[in-house]
Image (tube, helix red, strand yellow):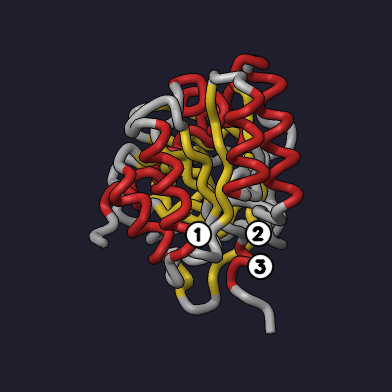
Amino acid sequence: MEQPSDILGKKIFFLYPHSVIHDEMLDILIMNGYESYSIRDHRKALRLLEHFPGSIMFINIDEGLEEREWEEYIQNIQRNPKTKDSRLGILSYNTDKGLMQKYLMEIGVQCGYIHLKLGLQASTKIMLDALRANEAKGRRKFIRASCVDDATATMNYKSPDGITYYGKLLDISSSGIAAKIEKFGDFPPNSRLREVQLKLRGTLVLTDVILMGNRREDKTEWIFLFDPKMAQNHKLVIHRFIKQNLQKYIDQLDI
């Protein structure tokens, strides 16, 4: 029987991430379809691992606790029946080979020891290799973030006949959006709507979209695919918005 993580992928947590990871690497991981979060509290991280069994967590051992405390923290995760299925990795600027051997061979972290001194590009490649090896993406192609409770996520489209349609975004992924539009024009499926304006928490994205149709259970909810030729800077805006919405969900989770 397939587990949800086999289909949807695993949640990937970064505990006390260095700024280079929080600001740049998470963008790359989300653009590659990995559901990634930043955590700044090692106590909450334990509760998250219990709440989402089978998750992956990379721990920055340069911050938060002393090295011996990190060793005990990791071993407690491995012993706890509620978290023992988690897969762990280490992030550090420390290049001491003895320390690396201890975590890899003695403690037995499954997702590697990543030396951040290698730089962003090399570290990201190692990270992506580790996530692929641990089948972190599952069979899902795109990460989808809910916008239902985000009043700042909207769209509008001015048709060739001069009518402007306004919509509230319901969810967004790198492939497209779902939006609620109360009164929409009679456009046939696969219509290309040019220069649709997305407003994502104050940032504007102008792009063509392909109308796929509406959701059967609600005729006011419409599905659109993004133009594959969308500008790279607009793609980055969308992925950062997805990252923010995912992070907001984890930050507000009451566990």
Give the percent coordinates (x, y) of residue 177: 54, 51
Residue at which label 1 appears: 78
Q: Secondary structure at mark 2?
A: strand
Q: Residue at x 24, y 60 (%)?
A: 254
Above or below residue 206? Residue 167 is: below
Q: Residue at x 46, y 49 (%)?
A: 74
In the rendered image, which quarter contains the C terminus?
A: bottom left
Q: Label 2 neighbourhood size at 10 Å, few (<14), some (14-19), many (20+)?
A: some
Comparing 159 with 134, the one in front is 134
Question: Which label sits on residue 170?
Answer: none
Q: Earlier in the sequence, mark 1 or mark 3?
A: 3
Image quadrant of residue 54? bottom right
Q: What amino acid is labelled 3 in the image?
A: Ile
Q: What amino acid is labelled 2 in the image?
A: Met
Q: Residue at x 67, y 16 (%)?
A: 118
Residue 38 appears anywhere in the view = no
Image quadrant of residue 148? bottom left
Image quadrant of residue 25? top right
Give the percent coordinates (x, y) of residue 149: 29, 54
Q: Earlier in the sequence, mark 3 or mark 2?
A: 3
Q: What amino acid is labelled 1 in the image?
A: Gln
Give the percent coordinates (x, y) of residue 136: 65, 54
Residue at which label 3 appears: 7
Comparing 187 with 84, the one in front is 84
Residue at which label 2 appears: 212
